[in-house]
Amino acid sequence: MKMVHALGLSAAVLLLGACATTPREASADKLARYQSFAGEPVRSIPYNASGSRGFDIIDEEHMVVEIRPTEGYLFSLSGPCLRDSSAPLLNISSQVGRVSAGFDRVSSLSQPGMTCIVKEIRPLDLKGLRAAEKAAASPT
């Protein structure tokens, strides 16, 4: 009986592990896709929270901030901090209308106390990204 219980517990742990790796792999693919359309790092970008179109959380350490339909940036953050990807409320600090790498922070209103420094900002070629996604989605 103990052997059956131990096998059942092991199977449950493996199933949970398999479930946990699937989103991570999807995040890795998503990050690789964004990175392939990202330019060289920049020190700072203009940012106005009310003018921002939104964001896309890739994983716990990366997010995309879209400023305009043709302007977006890949943010790398210090440490795992974007744990709650189910509609988090994020705040991006800025100084005089600019977000600066190494200085400004991303914090979560849905996770009090969660704050990360923006380590790196890379401009995205959103036009190229969307064209590649459209080409990949269309049947040949």
Image (tube, rainbow, N blue to C red):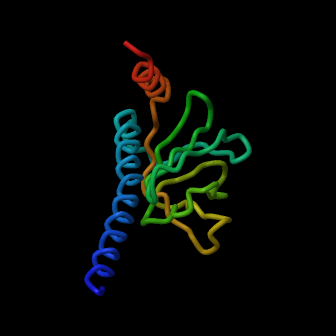
Furthest residue toward left? 3
Q: Height in image: 91 above or below 35? A: below
Residue at image coords 62%, 32%: 68
Q: Which image quarter holds the N terminus? A: bottom left
Q: Height in image: 126 above or below 116? A: above
Residue 36: x %, y % from top left = 34, 35
Residue 117: x %, y % from top left = 49, 63
Residue at image coords 51%, 64%: 83
**Which quadrant of the view contains residue 13?**
bottom left
User: Does the image show residue 94?
Assistant: no
Nearer to the camera, 102 or 88:
88
Residue at image coords 44%, 23%: 137
48 vs 5, left or right, is right
Nearer to the camera, 137 or 70:
137
Q: Height in image: 63 above or below 33? A: below
Nearer to the camera, 7 or 51:
7
131 vs 32, left or right, is right
User: Does the image show residue 28?
Assistant: yes
Q: Which image quarter holds the C terminus? A: top left
Furthest residue toward right? 50
**Which quadrant of the view contains residue 113?**
bottom right
